[in-house]
Image (cartoon, helix red, strand yellow):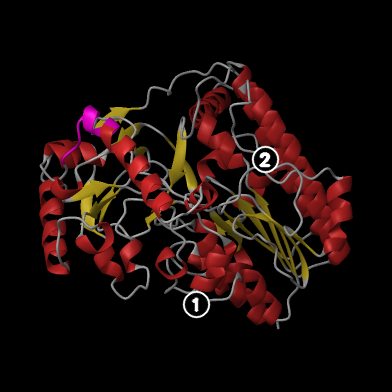
Amino acid sequence: MKLLVIGIDGGTKEIIEGMPMPFTQSLFKNANSKTLQEDPLSRGWAEALTGCHASENKGFYISPYADKTYDFNHGYSKKEMESSSPNPPLWTMLNDQGCSVGIINVPTTGPAAEVDGFLISGGGGGLSSIGGVPKGMFYPESIEESLIKNKYIFDIRLSKKETTISQFIKKIADAETTQKQTFLELANKHQPDFGFFCIRMITEVQYLTRYEIKRCIEGINSAKENNKPFVPENTVQETLMDYYQQVDDHIKEVFESIQPQEFLFISDHSTALFNHDLNLDVWLANNQFLTEISPLEKLYQRFYRSWKLTRFLNKLGIKRAFQKKFEKRPTREMITQFKPTKTKAFGTFFDSGNFAGIFINDAKRFAGPVADSEDVDKLVDEICTKFNADNETQKHNLQAVPYRRRFKESKFFDLMPDIQIEKPDTTYCSGRNWAFISENPNLKPFEDKLEGVSYPHTGLKGTDPLFVYSKNLESCIDKNDSNDLRMAYRLISRFFETEK
């Protein structure tokens, strides 16, 4: 194999260098790296697969439908990525250069394309958790035998069925073993020029246990200083130590079996510690940019909207089955309920990829009271000035900057927030708590039981994704490359161009 890419979803250099991963650490010591700065609104895997930012490939973690409703789209698919991006996807680009590929478990690759080589689609990118691999999610069909033999697990997500953290992590570890074994079998059989092996489910572990991972790293470092072995303090720490050692063993086995000429480690984002929760709607309400509705109005609005829609469709003779189909579009409704005619701006909310931003409630996208683009620009400047002068925002290192106006030439201009709040990665933007800034109550030693736990728990998306590569690949990086995951696509393309 000429080039092997190891993808680690949520991969974080600090974690890899701090947890028991001696083989991977040895690779990193003899490799080069870049500190990237990822836009938290743009999907990292989609950037690496197309060489394009979300403004070009529509790969937003969340975006409005901009159809005069306040519905937001949280879905994304390979079909959208391919149709929106001006660049061909990675596998097509490589096949067109005469290079065969072996790709497994990378998000936003399903349904599987017909490739020269093999491809097993990954979870993420709008796909839900599932055991086994459904038809259409792998190519060629002949590899199904390997999938069945190895009892391949497609994806695992945290669910209410899980009872303990250690059991959940063990389930992920077992699933990753099936994926590693399948990749090795197929790579040795097909001998692709390019390999992309993604460890996706590790991000589930890190969203859940980032605090205990931090405590493990601190304990390991302290033990080294005192020439003593590290002793885990609880069951979760014991499980984490075993899990990261197994991930390292898998990477070692892949390298020793395939022996790639060159390698690249990337992640779609890092995983930061979740210290604070941020609700921008509270600040907007306190500064008269947003007017929240009363609890009684909330109840009335919920009933009235449901009744009005049903009555309207019934008048048209449309059956309930169609209504259910109509309601199926992937939608996140606003957590903060506000008076549309009296609200000039509202914040981004839960499940936004840890992007903190503000939308102007304009007439074109939301049927709001802000009439035209000139008014929008004035309001953006007013909010940014007032936000940045606030003592509380300064205390928490928050700064408002215009965002959407940077992308006026983008065909997805209307899907973007007008303002970005630059902030520490450790501050999560959501609308779950009615407080401008609140501390995360979950940062304490863990019990093994999983009760009432949801994401993000103690970890969240960070903006400095993993980017570590063998030294010979340095010549494939241009000084003018964007300092984000678009660099991966360009590096891979240039490497195979020089190999011709």
**Relative to residue 57, is residue 107 depicted above or below?**
above
Disc number at residue 86?
A: 1
The mark nearer the N terminus, 1 or 2, is 2
Frontmost residue, 165 versus 187:
165
Instruction: Judge left or right: residue 475 versus residue 401.
Output: right
**Whether residue 488 is visible:** no
Q: Position of residue 230 (x, y in %)?
A: 61, 22
Q: Quadrant of the N terminus?
A: bottom right
Magenta residues (range): 291-299
Give the image quarter of residue 186. Answer: bottom right
Q: How many marks?
A: 2
Identified at 53% across, 76% down, the residue is 87
Disc number at residue 22?
A: 2
Q: Position of residue 345 (x, y in %)?
A: 20, 50
Identified at 16% across, 49% down, the residue is 341
Q: Amino acid at mark 1?
A: Pro
Q: Secondary structure at mark 2?
A: helix
